[in-house]
Image (spheres, rainbow, N blue to C red):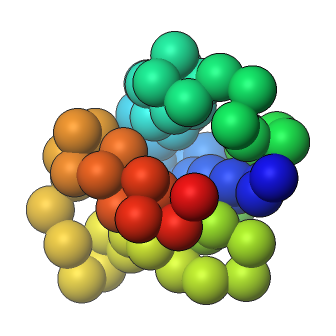
Amino acid sequence: MVTVEIEYCVPCGFLSRAQDVQHALLSTFGEELEAVTLRTGTDGVFVVRVGDEVVFDKAEDEFDVDGIVRQVRTHL
């Protein structure tokens, strides 16, 4: 089982986005995931990691919950 970490910018107001991704991942994969954790950050960060691998970075990709779910699926 894998752990997913969602690091999000607190001052930017990205908490709701992080929660949306967390909810989508838990609803889609349920017990296939060990944990989906939220990690606070700054400087516009919004990064999703599966284990140590970055599967989404707002600096490089457009925010899309379904796209993030697809990226996580490839690592299960």
Residue 60 shown left or right of residue 3 in the figure = left
Q: At which x and y percent is residue 25?
A: 51, 32
For the question of whether residue 76 can be seen, the reply is: yes
Residue at image location 24% in from the left, 83% down from the top: 60
Q: At which x and y percent is residue 39?
A: 76, 52
Q: At which x and y percent is residue 42?
A: 62, 65
| 4 or 41, nearer to the observer | 4
| 12 or 39, nearer to the observer | 39
Pick the quarter of the image with the C terminus: bottom right
Residue 17 shown left or right of residue 19 in the figure = left
Residue at image location 20% in from the left, 72% down from the top: 61
- How many numbered discs sit on the rendered protein? 0
Residue at image location 65% in from the left, 23% down from the top: 30
Using the image, determine if residue 43 lies above or below residue 19: below
Using the image, determine if residue 19 lies above or below residue 6: above
**Could you say which quadrant of the image residue 31 lies in?**
top right
Residue 19 shown left or right of residue 28 in the figure = right
Q: At which x and y percent is residue 47?
A: 51, 67
**Could you say which quadrant of the image residue 59 lies in?**
bottom left
Residue at image location 23% in from the left, 39% down from the top: 66
For the question of whether residue 19 can be seen, the reply is: no
